[in-house]
Amino acid sequence: MTRRLLVLTALSGSALLLAGAYLFQYFGYLPCQMCLWQRWPHVVAIVVGLAYLAFPSQVWPWLGAIAAAITSGLGVYHTGVERDWWEGPSSCSGGGGGALSGDLLSLDGPVLIMCDQVSWAFLGLSMASWNALFSALLCVIWVMAARRAT
């Protein structure tokens, strides 16, 4: 695969994960604050991918890999909160909305959704867990793109 195709794959993966999050939200699975945090790196990865397509450079895929690694890490952290491995932020456990509640990545106004509650799961994994896994895969794709000769 060429670097361009790998970047397109990673960019599309982030776009699909973000679209999936909005689709679940549309069908009533409102995001918690940590869910919203996980969306931002996908937006960054999409912008980075588009920047690469407009201005090809080896630096863009590395930035995409960092964005994917961040959202994967946030997904792992969120999974740990859901499974009571550690405590989450107080803003997700009754402390009120945070800076990202009701922001531009949210389809609805500010609503407090608990970060330690799993609203949907498939094969025993929550949306945060699936985001962590798929984002880790996207990180690998970004690194492959960065290491690929043009």
Image (cartoon, rainbow, N blue to C red):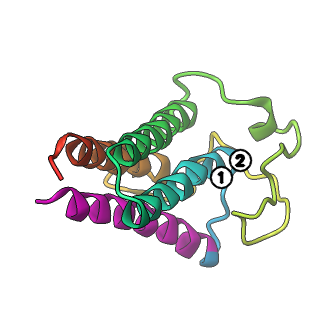
Q: Quadrant of residue 107?
A: bottom right
In the shown orientation, is residue 80 left or right of residue 113? left
User: What residue range appears in magenta?
Assistant: 1-25
Q: Which amino acid does label 1 sit on?
A: Leu
| SS majority, magenta | helix
In the shown orientation, is residue 12 left or right of residue 101? left
Residue 91: image x %, image y %? 80, 37
Question: Given contact means CB atoms under 8 Å apart, are the residues at marks 1 and 2 in contact?
Answer: yes
Q: Distance between the residues labelled 1 and 2?
A: 5 Å
Secondary element type, mark 2:
helix
In the shown orientation, is residue 58 left or right of residue 75? left
Secondary element type, mark 1:
helix
Disc 2 designates what residue?
A: 33
Query: Who is closer to the viewer here, 108 or 12?
Result: 12
Q: Quadrant of the N terminus?
A: bottom left
**Dot 2: within a 10 Å radius of its alpha carbon, few (fewer than 14), some, or many (20 or more) residues?**
many
Is 38 magenta? The answer is: no
Residue drawn at x 35%, y 47% as measured from the top left? 61
Residue drawn at x 18%, y 53% as measured from the top left? 150
Residue 15: image x %, image y %? 45, 67
Residue 36 image label:
1
